[in-house]
Image (cartoon, helix red, strand yellow):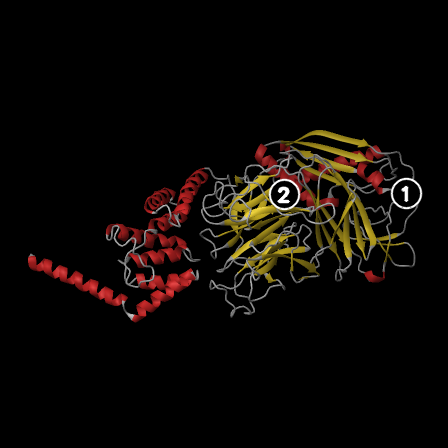
Amino acid sequence: MIKNLLIVAFLAISFSIAGQEDYMDFEFRERFREANLLMQEENFDEASDIWMEKVNNHTENANLNYKTGYALLNSSKDRKSSLQYLKIAEQLRGDKFSNWNINDYDPFDPQEVNAPIETPYYLAKSYLLNGDFEEALNNFNKANELLGNKHHLKDDCLRYIETTKNAIFFTNNPIPNPKIVNLGEKINGKYDDFSPVLSLDERALYFTSRRARSDSSNVKTIAEDGKFYEDIYISYKDVQGEWGTPELLNINEADKHLATVNVSPDGQQLYVYDGSIGDGTLKESKMIGELWSEPVKLGTDINSKHWETHITLTPDGNTMYFVSDRPGGHGERDIYRVVKLPNGKWSKALCLPKEVNTKYNEDAPYIHPDGRTLYFASEGHKSMGGFDIFKTDLNDDGQWSIPENIGYPINTVEDDVFYVMSPDRKRAYFSSDRVGGFGKKDVYRIDLPTPPDEINLAVLKGAIESPEELPDDIAIYVTNTSTDVTKSYKPRARDGVFVAILEPCNDYDIDYTINGISIKQETISVDCGSSYREINREILLDPVNLANSKFVDILVDVDPKTGKTDDVDKQVGSTTTSDDGTVVQTKTSDDDVTVISTSKDDVTVVSTSEVGTVFFDVYYGYNQTGTDLDKERFEIFVEDVVELIEQKGNIDITLEGSASRVPTKTWGTNEKLARARVDKGKENLLTAIQAKGVDINKLNIKTIDSSVQGPIYSGDYKNIEKYTKYQFLKITGK
């Protein structure tokens, strides 16, 4: 028996000596040193490869298990796998070494076989990542007991105890039925893809990527962390609603960081982060055709010698919110505000109050097109861990509401940042380094089944269409008739799209111009009780030489079926129309006169829509009926009706038709025309609902109202603004 014990002891000593000799081996020491240097440079992917290679040969080495787990936890690989190594490291540290060598732990010594006192802290973070919140909390509490009050992780540990409790609460009370979709491998890849910026029409997506360029122009320029520098890409949505292959913006340089921050509401200014100057600078680039100008540093009190990371601006362009770590804030990085003064200059920067900013980091503010709802990322407040996305509202008294965590599973224990939202609040985009993506950071879309709040907002979405190249000198002027403030918009050169935000309780004069000459005018009224509405416009340019054409404003009443003018006083002239009755060209003389028009009307009244109510309206030209004048919006309305039926079982439908007092020979009387508008609207609705496979008996037609309204006709049929607002069909379902 004694002999056997001696043999066992000898074998154990021999194994220990062999192991120590291996640790002193030149190749082992060089690889150990290399992996440590890679971790100092935060190149955790390559470091983890070396540590895994070594730990597989030394499974009982607490230090190698710790370093492998730590590197994996911070890598872009399978970070969940860090748990197995950190568990072994903590077990060996506790069981084999107890508290031995805790104070003398040397991370740079290849012969070090113990794990450091910080091991339970990182083990807790790995448990958190793996969704085991109870074990995470146990190990954070354990780490808190071990770490001294002056330890650099002490405050972080206490904070993680709080955030882990928050994670338990939010995961037990998730958001009902959110659909979170990874945007796929066209947008996301094995590299970091983040900071999505969305155009208001949701057709253009800007984002930042650290990928290898398709032309290999950046393969030899590597940043200090071992990754490619940040580049800005843009992807356009096709007619099927799929994102196209991202295109590298022309303003990127291979050897410096350039990242997306924001885009102006009209899509003409792109705000970027330039990481090549000091700690980081915010810049502005302007769209010129399909290219972007050289980014220029933002003036005023925004940039400083400190770190400015992100900016967002209100739809009216009068307020900017940005992030800085300058002195004088409430914590590390804070959100600041500047406002445009009456003299056109910008105010000094003001730090938002402690209701918004915390002693931790805030970042990535995004002001919704309503101008009052601010989304931002924060490590403070009731975060689940890392950055979470929060929402706060600016009240009528100028105070910010207490920020709300927008909830799980949008927020996770990982960093969830760069949140932007569609104007109707039905979709949002953000970036996250949650487990399960293509790389460490990916871009995601959220489909929210129920918008969080009612929105008092209207969005004008238009497109200038031309069979030839779009002229450079097209401009759309939008004038608020209450304030007499005019803003100009240019269509996107690629597809002719333009977007404008229209605030409620205002009338807007819209003037479409080419080379300073007005080609079409209209008035849009947005009443005070409106919910979210979209107004769509398509302007078709005649396929003649636009530069040599004369543009005049002519009222032409057209039968949508025949394309002929109605004989009111006299025939205006021969007309050329598209299949849907759109006027393309009118000949009134031997000279070419190009009439720019659409099947939409010159006055659009945006009406009230209650919560739980679906609404459709169409405003007519002379003698028109039906819903084909706004076919796309009618189809959306039908889908909304079907969805409401699915929710409520049955719904009430109210139809209202109106005619102006302009005489009509086609219908005999204005009363018959008003009634025809109601009847045709009802017929189209029932037909469309039936085509969707829905029982039309689930529609309760409660009210059918037709009327003749407006001023007495005085022969001024050209006065569109006077009469068109009384020529409409309105359908409400609730």
Disc sitting over residue 568 in the figure: 1
Residue 530's spot in the image, x, y percent?
A: 69, 36
User: Quadrant where the N terminus lies?
Assistant: bottom left
- Of callouts 1 and 2, the N-terminal one: 2
User: Which three-letter amino acid code belongs to the residue tagged 2?
Assistant: Asp
Report helix, strand or loop for mark 2: loop
Task: Establish if 58 lies above or below 379.
Answer: below
Report whether 81 appears left or right of 281: left
> In front: 390, or 558?
390
Report whether 728 appears left or right of 186: right
Q: CA distance from mark 1 to mark 2?
A: 42 Å
| Residue linked to disc 2 | 424
Residue 428 shows in the view: no
Question: Going 73% across and 49% down the picture, which residue do you hit?
Answer: 344
Number of disc labels: 2
Residue 101's spot in the image, x, y percent?
A: 27, 54
Report whether 631 appears left or right of 49: right
